[in-house]
Image: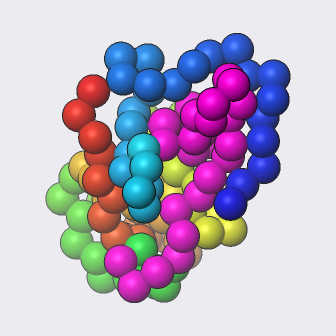
Amino acid sequence: MGHHCDHHDHNHGEGCGHTAIKHGDHVDYLHDGHLHHQKDGGHVEHHAIEVSSQNPDKCTDGHNCSSHEKDHIHGPGCGHEAVPHGDHTCYLVDGHLHFPHDGHCDDHGPVEVVKK
């Protein structure tokens, strides 16, 4: 499902301080723009939210996002956490994946943020 990060010095789990997202039948953790899945033995696997009917990668020009200013541009340092989605990076905004595209913000669907 993803590549391994064998030299990760942090164990993800309840109370680790990273945003937890339900991903299929397990929970992954957002860490430095990666979606980490903690494996036994201290190994971490990098995951991505799959493109699906719930999380499409299509353009939603005209999406009325009231969660941030209309002229807000997502990217590194924008204040929203980066989330790997398919072959691109989205940004977590109020439980939804937002993608900057051609001067507007696409809604790439909901994700379930697990309470920390």
- Residue 28 locus on image (x, y percent): 48, 43
- Residue 35 locus on image (x, y percent): 57, 44
Vertical side of 11 occupied by 26: above or below: below
- Residue 15 locus on image (x, y percent): 36, 17
Q: Which residues are magenta?
A: 28-54
Vertical side of 8 occupied by 97: above or below: below
Which residue is pictured at 70% across the width and 14% down the height?
9
Split into 4 quadrants, where in the image is the C terminus?
A: top left
Q: Is residue 115 visible?
A: yes
Report the side of 86 relative to 20 (left or right): right
Report the side of 105 relative to 48 (left or right): left
Q: Is residue 52 magenta?
A: yes
Report the side of 76 relative to 55 (left or right): right
Closer to us: 17 or 4: 4
Which residue is pictured at 78% across the width and 34% down the height?
5
Which residue is pictured at 28% across the width and 40% down the height?
114
Which residue is situated farthest in the front direction here? 40
Which residue is pictured at 43% across the width and 17% down the height?
16
Closer to us: 55 or 72: 55
